[in-house]
Image: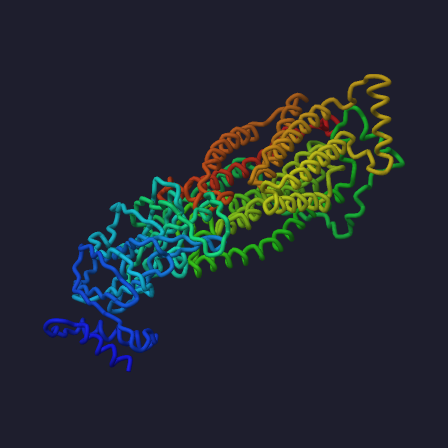
Amino acid sequence: MVLRSCWKSRHKNSSGPAPCWTRPRLAALLWLCVTQFVCGSGAEGETNNVIQKDAEFDVTYNDTVTSENQTIYAFNHTVSRNKGVRVFVDVLSQGFESPILFVVRQKQAVVSFQVPLILRGLYQRKYPYSHVGRTLCQPPTRAASETQYFFVDVSTLSSLGTNYQLRVSRVESFTLQTDKKFSFTASPSQPQYFKYVFPDGVDTVIVKVNSEMTFPCSVMSIQDIQCPVYDLDNNVAFIGMYQTMTKKGAITVQRKDFPSNSFYVVVVVKTEDEACGGPLRFYPLRPDELIDAGNRSKFIDVIVTPAINSEVYVMGMLFCLGIFLSFYLLTLLMTCLENKRVGRSRQESLSSVEEDDYDTLDDITSDKNIVRTKKFLCVSDLSRKDKRILSKKYQIYFWNIATIAVFYALPVVQLVITYQTVVNVTGNQDICFYNFLCAHPLGALSAFNNILSNLGYVLLGLLFLLIVLKRDIVHNRALVRNDLNALECGIPKHFGLYYAMGTALMMEGLLSACYHVCPNYTNFQFDTSFMYMIAGLCMLKLYQKRHPDINASAYTAYACLAGVIFFSVLGVVFGKGNTVFWIIFSVIHILSTMLLSTQLYYMGRWRLDAGILRRIVYVIYTDCIRQCSGPMYIDRMVLLVMGNIVNWSLAAYGLIERPNDFASYLLAIAICNLLLYFAFYIIMKLRSGERIQCLALVCILFTAVVWGFALYFFFQGLSTWQKTPAESREHNRDCILLSFFDDHDIWHFLSSIAMFGSFLVLLTMDDDLDTVQRDKILAF
């Protein structure tokens, strides 16, 4: 009955001569009849007028639609691979209760949208748009051009007449050209997308989208050539790869991911700016209230450029290997120049020595309280314990950090693999904070260059372990033959901390590489954890050189470093703008500084118990009130005063400024203390009449220069997870070395070399004392 009434209605409302029934018109009529049959629209006796028009491109149609009539516009279109079609609709009436439905029917696709178009934002806010523009999906064609019909159906349920304007135009520049910039304007209700076809010989391209306008926030998407195209704010994330953007956006696209050797570049402007770090305007949250979004048009440039080829990948890898293997060759050359033959020697078994027997100083012959409280201490006063015990003690540093590394690295590797898988599967480019303008994929990895550049930490850490091993063997050989210089001269040789430092440098490379698989704020501690380890171990090694008997045990040291990492995680998660957290951390920081200062000043000869306050008051009364006497250990006091000034200043800065990057702030505290102690050590060494040998001096100067250049590249800031992903991309820059490495990669190169040089400084700076009796070497 519905089909019959539809057919009768068509003839009844037709006037004049009978129309010539062509296939497109018949198809349009059948579409209308089937729609009425399925939907059951129209009660018996109701008249439904269907008006079909042969429409033309680039002609604006001003019409009125009601619930009693429908209009079908038929377009005869020659489909071309390089051209597209765009539909523009304006609703001239102000009523939003009964919108107009536009249905565009193509050969292999149907696109429907209502006008006013209602787009939702946060908290279900509704934004109406009366001006809508949509690009039609281009159906695949075997020939270069093909003639097809498509229809635009206009209908509404409103009984009142609604005026609208319809215009359909051809998009002449629908296909993007390689290395040619194309400019256009987009808005939330008028998204844009264009086609790109891979040229012969190009397997990877970088799609770059730029705008001089920070806001409105927009989304860039790469989608396969298929219908429908998801080009609205509420569905652009359904398929393909996508990322939010303000001024910059870039996505690397590989031919292997698109079987048709082509893809769509889709640009959508969001209804709100909150996703890009912009303000979220406040409106009363009233049910079904429509909010005027204002003008959210954005002028955008897009350019598609070829990415690097396989030759550049090979050159980058060879360059990276060449730099660090040259250090191996240089080390081998210097070893040969030493003109010493190194042989294996049987090390004395330590299996029967227990670590609990640390304190073996013979209290009967000499009271350590008397020895360690002398005004002028020598290394001999603080190296009285059994060498086997101390060697065992410091070897535990190496075995503990090796155990920590294994248990820490395994879940880290598993987690970052999961991160990369999620990015590849979902296509969400906002998960990871890459430098998208210089992110070269390899296999499943999105930024292989940032991972490769961490190779220096591993190779140079291994080289340092080999250098330490060589020195260890030479020293043990000297002990076996009872060499007096090895037994009674120079700084006591304990290599456990050196082994731990080399291992930490290798782990820093591994974990930094893991972090750069998908850098973001949730895994930033992977990149910094072993930096804390390295800074702590270097300070311990400096102190151990002249205080081997009273240096911290491995368990105490690693427990303290674990506390630092714990606070680092808390700071990253809860520290941003949290005043309570910063107050607690600053108090703990200051108290820890004071306790450590007391420990260092009194060489461990004090107790933290219930009587500590009484003893503090007594010391203040006797030394400051009763008689004003200066400090007994002036050199130590100078160091500790300077250290307290620096740490109190850093605590005040953190409490006042509350920096967002808490992990870097904590690392800055560790580095400042290390540099302060190192400077104090060098000054005291020179003040004591000791000298620095040529090799150590060259290492110091070389390391200082490399650190300067490294820090320059570190502060370039190519991305930051302290901001939104869109804001982070504003800092992205092109590659600067071999078209493969960016500024942060150069930081990796230089910082690994600088750390290796710093380790060599610690290893060689006291070589001048190898023939000096220990009772003539001052402990400071």
Q: Quadrant of the N terminus?
A: bottom left
Decide which of 460, 531 is in the foreground and name it.
531
Q: Toward which corner of the image does residue 375 lie, by quadrant? A: top right
In the image, residue 687 sits, relative to residue 453, either above or below, namely: above
Q: Residue at x 69, y 39 (%)?
A: 584
Vertical arrangement, residue 237 with respect to residue 490, above or below: below
Classify residue 12 as left or right of residue 297.
left
Residue in the foreground of this view, choosing between 673 and 432: 432
The x and y percentages for residue 234 are 41, 57
**x, y percent for residue 524:** 55, 47
Left or right: residue 326 compared with residue 644: left
Quadrant (top left, top right, bottom left, bottom right) of the C terminus? top right
The answer to whether 579 appears left or right of 447 in the picture is right
Question: Residue placed at 16% from the left, 66% from the top?
Answer: 147
The chosen color scheme is rainbow
Farthest bottom residue in view: 1
Which residue, as the protein is rendered here, is positioned at the far front? Answer: 45
Which residue is outermost to the right?
Answer: 364
Q: How many marks?
A: 0
Q: Position of residue 282 (x, y in %)?
A: 49, 45
Instruction: Residue 760 in the image: state x and y as whole percent.
Output: 57, 36
Residue extending furthest toward the top:
628
Q: Quadrant of residue 597?
A: top right
**Above/below status of 410 relative to 490:** below
* Residue 196 seen anywhere in this rendered image of the structure: no
Query: Is residue 730 visible from the viewing direction of this image?
Result: yes
Q: Residue at x 54, y 56 (%)?
A: 413
Picture quadrant where residue 541 is located: top right
